[in-house]
Image (cartoon, coloured by chain):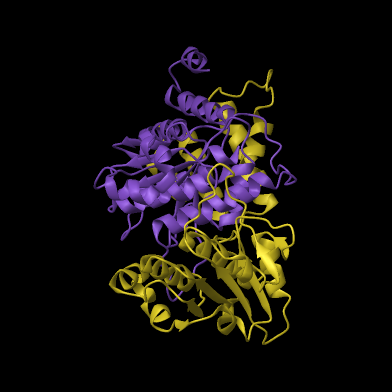
Chain colours: A purple, B yellow
Amino acid sequence: MQLNTRIVLVGTTHPGNIGSAARAMKTMGLHDLVLVSPRHPPDDEARARASGADDVLAGARIVDSLDEAIADCELVVGASARTRRLGAEPVGPREAVNQVMALPDGARAALLFGRERTGLTNEELDRCHRLLHIPANPDYSSLNIAAAVQVMCYELRMAAIDGALPETGGRNQPYATAGELEQLYDHFEQVLLEIGFLDPNNPRQLMRRIRRFFARATPDRNEVNIFRGILSAVEGRGSAPRRRRDRE
Amino acid sequence: MQLNTRIVLVGTTHPGNIGSAARAMKTMGLHDLVLVSPRHPPDDEARARASGADDVLAGARIVDSLDEAIADCELVVGASARTRRLGAEPVGPREAVNQVMALPDGARAALLFGRERTGLTNEELDRCHRLLHIPANPDYSSLNIAAAVQVMCYELRMAAIDGALPETGGRNQPYATAGELEQLYDHFEQVLLEIGFLDPNNPRQLMRRIRRFFARATPDRNEVNIFRGILSAVEGRGSAPRRRRDRE
């Protein structure tokens, strides 16, 4: 369901913005809020801005790392005003929501919103399957965080109540979670180092390109297992088929 | 044009909300703001909230009556959480924007937003051609004024750029051709056989799954080259880094 989408605020500076974001969420029927290392925890200003959405604010989880916030999410979409040469695929708000709707039952998406001044770091954007670009006025694209959250929660609600919208995918395997993908990337990197394809002294953008490719495909768990199996077979090459079978 | 749409705030109590509304407007490319009898004129709080949209705030007209605010407008749409038995036709955000877009050239629409607590009066709603209903959470429909303005200005902008901007996109590498993908799959299969991961006597659906995965990602030529390079490195493993470099 679209309304179980998690809103993740990363490194927010002003607690008032957290409160306003909670209010924006609840007006559209969302409730799952995670705060990654906020500068200050929610305070009176945050609660005042949350208004009647203080339950969403009170229920917000505060975590230390982005990985912790998204580990169980199958689709991670990061808001970014910038486009990056090697980033994940950029999508507009409606395309992002379509992709949330195409998730299998029980899967969960996370929408990430970065710091007020600087947004999400490149390392944080590397965790994203998609980059969200809200098409703002090029001469003044400075959406307040709560305004961006409002727009996206509104789009999610519009999609949720437009029950007629067809499921695009037809994919019935559970998607891999962000945590499972991180394990795949780690394994991939280790094998690429081992076979000498990745030069640790000159990594160029290889791992970022591989991330982008896999993120675009939003692999299911079975596919991740296939790649993990292939990587294990490459590692174990020459040793024995036994080892491979252990991994299967 | 949709972006010449006027935003009319009627009887606003908190100047901060006026500033936030100005910011919401400018982020989406709107600039025509009219304030009908605000409780307080825009002040420092309003300017702080307007942030870089202080020009929109400074350009706002302040008038004494709603009639004065909308006299030159061909379509007047009033936001209202209530429905009225005898009111104007209720429309959702997208239908409202469609009707704005259907106006003849040079015509102007006004979107009206009422007081924080009490909204628009019945007399004010009687001035409207349409009643705008933003489909919020029935258990908590309390959109802040600036949030409602943000949602509507966003919808106007989306309509304005519709057709001009691809929703997805951003990929500038040429996609791999079907022929290049076939070569990749052949190479992949050969390596999977070589490392013993693919059993020719029991191939199951492995290659089909790999095809489906790659097809879903619609790889570009560069990505195909990376995977071909990795496959060559696996084949050449133990022989020499020289060979890998040849393939790159």
Query: Is A47 in front, or is A14?
Result: A47
- Among all residues in the image, which is located at the extreme left? A40
Task: Tally the marks.
Answer: 0
- Left or right of residue A48, residue B235 in this image: right
Q: Quadrant of residue B21?
A: bottom left
Above or below, comparing residue B113 to residue B75 in the picture: above
Query: Is A81 in front, or is B211?
Result: A81
- Left or right of residue B58, residue B174 in this image: right
Q: Quadrant of residue A83?
A: bottom left
For the point 56% across and 40% down, the residue is A3
For the point 42% across and 33% down, the residue is A71
Query: Is B132 in front, or is B68?
Result: B68
Above or below, comparing residue A151 to residue A33 in the picture: below
- Left or right of residue B102, residue A186 in this image: left
For the point 65% across and 32% down, the residue is B209
Q: Quadrant of residue B189?
A: top right
Q: Position of residue B127 (x, y in %)?
A: 66, 74
The reply to whether residue A127 is visible in this rendering is: no
For the point 67% across and 30% down, the residue is A172
Q: Position of residue B169 (x, y in %)?
A: 58, 60
The reply to whether residue A172 is visible in this rendering is: yes
Q: Position of residue A44 (x, y in %)?
A: 28, 46
Which quadrant is home to the N terminus of chain A? Answer: top right
- Left or right of residue B166, residue B38 in this image: left
Q: Position of residue B126 (x, y in %)?
A: 67, 70
Above or below, comparing residue B108 to residue B165 in the picture: below
